[in-house]
Amino acid sequence: MKTSSLTKNAFLLAAICATAICATEGRSETKAAPAKPNIVVVLADDFGFGDAACYDPKFSKIPTPNIDRLAREGMSFMQAHSSSAVCTPTRYGLLTGRYNWRSRLQGGVLGPYAAPLISSDRLTVAGLLKQQGYYTAAIGKWHLGWQYPKRDGKEVFDQPITEGPTTRGFDYYFGTDVPNYPPYTFIENDRVTVQPTAQFSANKDKSLFVHRDGPMAPGWRFDRILPTLAEKAVDYIGQRAKAKQPFFLYFALTTPHEPIAPSEQFKGKSGISGVGDLIMESDWALGQVMDALVKQGLAENTLVIFTSDNGHCAYTGLEPFEKAGHRVSGPFRGYKMDAWDGGHHLPFIARWPGVVKPGSQCAQITSHNDIMATCAEITGAKIPVTAAVDSFSLLPLLKGENRPIREAVVTHSSRGMFAIQRGEWKLIVGQGAGSGRPGDTGPEPGQLYNTTADIGEMKNLYAQRPEIVAELTALLKRYVEDGRSTPGPKQKNDVPVNWNKKPPAGKRGGKAADSPDA
């Protein structure tokens, strides 16, 4: 059954049952995976579960034709989770296959000009694929830190910016680093493309939701960021089509995250809000990549993955969506930053002709961290025991198998509150949303939900099922203390991990942060 025609009951079953049968069951003629396919990962920013029309068809009020097309041509994962409910930590997990809380980042996101979060000796997806003969590129938002040069204690931009993507496994980078952070200019590899000699004032247009003054390229236009990135991605695909070498493209969209600046083509198009327009523009950007693959004759041997870093953002305005009847988080409780599923339960679609059955679904629990182990198995790469310690291969699921690939998934709120889900049971180690957002969860010290019977996480069973609480607590404790959740020798976390105690709010770069910049 295609995602776009799901009945309500069928949708709920697929979305919540971790042991449900994948829609690929019964297919016996799955072809062997092609040798070293091209791999494209498109990561949207602040794109909620319900923002993809094919994931919540009854309530969606925003057309996403390219995402829907990808779902018709590939597999929709219905229990896919980012490792965090905010930006930087999810990107860390996706690129390293390691939970962010094993690093110094115990909550929040990196701030402007922050030092690199991925250590220079840590293997990334890009580094692994590069070892397998791939040409690797990151286009778009980075938000994992750089080493900015300084003069007289102040950042300067007339010298190389070191320790960025091209030192973390990527052959090429083009992007804005963080579109709502200074410097407001594009960076190519390790240099700005235009010197930021002008100055941006955050007070000039508060509707942008850009809150930081800073150096800016003359004539800089926030509404041209995504179109420029999409053009670069299309150009990259065209260039690689001429080479006899597989390629990896990590296309990290800057939308629908702030700046709330849709391009002229999409301004007002959703009929809901600027954020709604950016949802449509995000879908368009994915379509540009899909069309480029077809045009260059590469679609048949390319694995394309579309997902998001975290849930839909509440602070940029929910009222227009609620008024329109559009559920940004689908049936789930919460939004970006939250420990509840609305913060991290997201669309995840994979298309790979000849391997993935078109129009299929799978409800096994997965994590964005699993991309690294998947790429390793696809290419025959051997992962060192020190790498991808929280990554499990999706390849069996992509081929249509129906079995759990991981025991459980761990997620993290913006303030560093832990949650762990195994099967239908989800334990949140604390009260409330873990983001400062209000929400009554009862007097118990934690929250336990049966996500099959209670998809909206409204009935806290913490006191009623102490044996489940004890089991999940012990499992989380083991994952933390072992330094890994995959089989293998124990590893060290970079810092002590306070898994059962919410870290205090504080400055960015390692502690909790609840600013609209998150």
Image (spheres, rainbow, N blue to C red):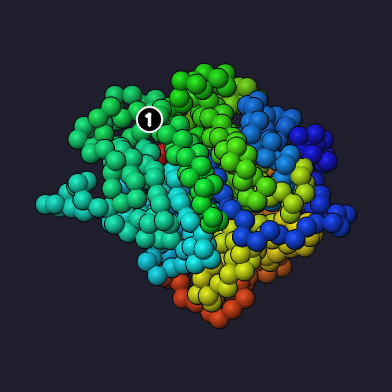
69 relative to 288 in the view: left or right:
right
Give how far across and how far down residue 137 sits, in percent: 46, 51
Q: Residue placed at 71% from the left, 48% from the top? A: 353
Q: Quadrant of residue 55?
A: top right
Name the one closer to the observer, 69 or 412: 69
Residue 61 percent coordinates (x, y) = 65, 25
Between residue 223 and residue 53, name the one nearer to us: 223
Q: Amino acid at mark 1?
A: Phe
Reading the image, the residue beneath label 1 is: 222
Q: Residue furthest bottom?
A: 489
Residue occupying image coordinates x 22% and y 32%: 199
Q: Is residue 100 above or below residue 197?
A: below
Q: What residue do we see at 17% from left, 49% from top?
A: 154
- Crowd around label 1: few <14 · some 14–19 · many ≥20 (10 Å): some
Which structural element holds mark 1?
helix
Give the residue displayed 64% in from the left and 34% down from the top. Answer: 66
